[in-house]
Image: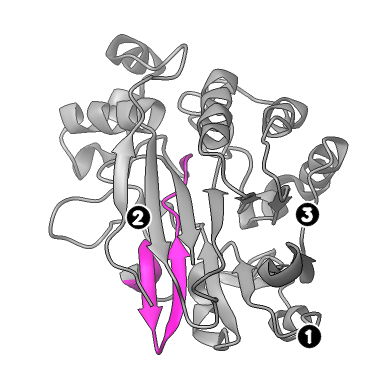
């Protein structure tokens, strides 16, 4: 079993129509609600990082249950949150181009496809972001799950957009992929926060046991989830769990926990390669933003996972 800290490189080419300091100030975001937490100049930097930064974060591991001689590469796109000022159509096009350039065997989309914060300056219709995602290419295909924002704000529109471009949505489902001695199961879990039912209370559509019951051979299992909190219940049968949702904290200052970590476990599952009791999970920092269009210390990223 191998693991350790991820390697990361930053793509040098910024997105066309990138956000500038002048453009930021025109949107009025320079004096956002976070001004009381971080200095205005830092807020400007955080907005520009959200709009212009793009990293590829690499994880190489052979988790338990995964055959050492069975290589597989996965490109992970999480929390796109399409919408300006930081995720307009040109920016989404850059993300897709960068993911395709990785030449991974499989590409997975971990939900939250459109922006819902009140600072949206460019509305990106569902058909527009879906059309860009339709350009994703991988030998084993592209698979998606849905996130809480998709459920809360327009689940029917999100489903229709993905169906129109023929990107399969996995919801408490599992599919056997690969050929011969390189087969594996890809499973996708329903969202855990789908229906708000009270103050900070939700009813999910996730069915972990039902999903894993669809795994009918001894081949290894990769599980896609939107929220990482389910990790405490995932059995050792699953070789690797891939999650998003947290944005890595989105605003992170050195040596302190993230200000924003939407998890019942705080920063425990906020970001990165997490190993507990021999089980492995990778939580992507994602690409877009929630609440405010700012990122600090957690640049937008595409995750590349190399197994075996």
Q: Is residue 278 magenta?
A: yes
Q: How many residues crowd around disc 2 within 10 Å: few (fewer than 14), some, or many (20 or more)?
A: many
Q: Position of residue 177 (x, y in %)?
A: 75, 63
Identify which residue is drawn at 56% across, 53% down: 74
Discs 1, 2 touching: Cβ within 8 Å: no
Element under disc 1: loop
Distance between mark 1 and mark 3 Cα atoms: 18 Å
The mark lying in front, picked from 1 and 2, is 1
Q: Nearer the viewer, residue 112 or 95?
A: 95
Q: Position of residue 243 (x, y in %)?
A: 52, 62
Residue 213, disc: 1
Q: Tell me the residue that label 2 is attached to.
A: 249
Q: Position of residue 184 (x, y in %)?
A: 68, 70
Distance between mark 1 and mark 2 Cα atoms: 33 Å
- The boundaries of the magenta stretch are 268-289
Residue 28 visible here: yes
First of labels 3, 2 by sequence position: 3
């Amino acid at each position: 079993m191998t693991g350790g800290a991820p390697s990361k490189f930053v793509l040098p080419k910024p997105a066309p129509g990138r956000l500038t300091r002048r453009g930021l100030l025109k949107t009025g975001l320079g004096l956002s609600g976070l001004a009381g937490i971080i200095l205005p100049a830092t807020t400007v930097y955080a907005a520009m990082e959200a709009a212009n930064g793009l990293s590829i974060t690499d994880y190489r591991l052979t988790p338990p249950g995964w055959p050492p001689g069975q290589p597989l590469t996965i490109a992970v796109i999480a929390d796109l949150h399409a919408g300006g000022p930081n995720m307009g159509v040109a920016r989404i096009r850059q993300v897709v181009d960068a993911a395709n350039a990785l030449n991974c065997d499989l590409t997975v989309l971990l939900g939250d496809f459109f922006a819902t914060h009140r600072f949206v300056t460019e509305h990106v219709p569902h058909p527009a972001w879906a059309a860009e995602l339709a350009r994703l290419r991988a030998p084993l295909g592209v698979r998606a799950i849905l996130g809480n924002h998709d459920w809360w704000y327009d689940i029917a529109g999100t489903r229709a957009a993905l169906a129109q471009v023929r990107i399969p949505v996995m919801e408490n489902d599992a599919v056997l992929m690969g050929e011969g001695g390189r087969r594996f199961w890809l499973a996708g879990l329903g969202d855990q926060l789908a229906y708000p039912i009270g103050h900070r209370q939700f009813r999910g559509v996730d069915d972990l046991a039902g999903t894993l019951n669809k795994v009918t051979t001894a081949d290894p299992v990769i599980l896609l989830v939107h929220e990482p909190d389910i990790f405490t219940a995932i059995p050792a049968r699953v070789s690797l769990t891939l999650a998003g949702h947290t944005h890595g904290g989105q605003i992170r200052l050195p040596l302190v926990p993230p200000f924003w970590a939407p998890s019942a476990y705080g920063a425990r599952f906020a970001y990165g390669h997490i190993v507990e009791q021999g089980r492995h999970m990778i939580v992507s920092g994602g690409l877009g933003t929630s609440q405010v269009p700012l990122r600090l210390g957690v640049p937008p990223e595409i995750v590349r996972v190399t197994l075996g």
